[in-house]
């Protein structure tokens, strides 16, 4: 049993990129599905597919690499809020990730969204992770 599924999600992606894999499979949940959609919309992954087995389902993510240098598109995945120490922020307290080049994923009362979307809707919430 995994006690922190978000950290497991980020670690699986990080490990697959360090090993040079093209595809990574992750056990699905609604939160992980939404985080995957955000990664895709921000251009950090090539594509994704939600597969339904007879249990909780699987998310298959095709990782994105630079064609010339073979470097992964995601330079860093950093977990912010964790089960032992939750981190909450209001829209005024959101910090810029990598001087505006990165993205923070926030869990708000209106759903999981990026820091820019949360600031536009003027909602705060739990800062799940920083990606750049």
Image: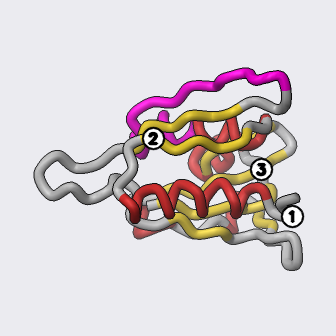
Q: Earlier in the sequence, mark 2 or mark 3?
A: 2
Quadrant where the image shows the N terminus? bottom right
Which tag is nearer the camera, tag 1 or tag 3?
1
Q: Which mark is residue 23?
A: 2
Cα distance between the residues tagged 2 and 3: 26 Å
Q: Nearer the viewer, residue 35 or 19?
A: 19
Question: Residue tagged by mark 3?
Answer: 107
Instruction: Report crowding for label 1: few under 14, some 14 to 19, many 20 or more residues within 10 A (C-alpha).
Output: few
Which tag is nearer the camera, tag 2 or tag 3?
2
Q: Secondary structure at mark 2?
A: strand
Q: Are marks 2 and 3 in contact (CB under 8 Å)?
A: no
Instruction: Report crowding for label 2: few under 14, some 14 to 19, many 20 or more residues within 10 A (C-alpha).
Output: some
Image x and y of residue 132, in percent: 43, 61
Instruction: Report crowding for label 3: few under 14, some 14 to 19, many 20 or more residues within 10 A (C-alpha).
Output: many
Residue 104, by quadrant, is: bottom right
Query: Is 80 placed left or right of 38 in the picture?
Result: right
Image x and y of residue 33, in percent: 68, 35
Query: Is 33 placed left or right of 125 in the picture?
Result: left
Q: Nearer the viewer, residue 85 or 17?
A: 17
Residue 17's place in the image compared with 55, above or below, is below
Image x and y of residue 9, in percent: 66, 54
Residue 60's place in the image compared with 99, above or below, is above
């Amino acid at each position: 049993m995994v006690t922190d599924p978000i950290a497991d999600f980020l670690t699986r992606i990080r490990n697959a990129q360090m090993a040079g894999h093209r595809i990574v499979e992750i056990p699905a949940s609604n939160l992980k599905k939404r985080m995957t959609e955000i990664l895709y919309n921000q251009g950090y992954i090539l594509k994704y597919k939600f597969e339904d087995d007879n249990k909780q389902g699987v998310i298959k993510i095709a990782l994105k690499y630079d064609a010339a240098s073979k470097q992964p598109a995601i330079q860093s995945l950093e977990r912010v809020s964790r089960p032992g120490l939750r981190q909450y922020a209001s829209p005024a307290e959101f910090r810029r990730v990598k001087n505006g080049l990165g993205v923070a994923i926030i869990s708000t009362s209106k759903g999981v969204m990026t820091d820019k979307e949360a600031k536009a809707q003027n909602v705060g919430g739990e800062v799940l992770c920083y990606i750049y």
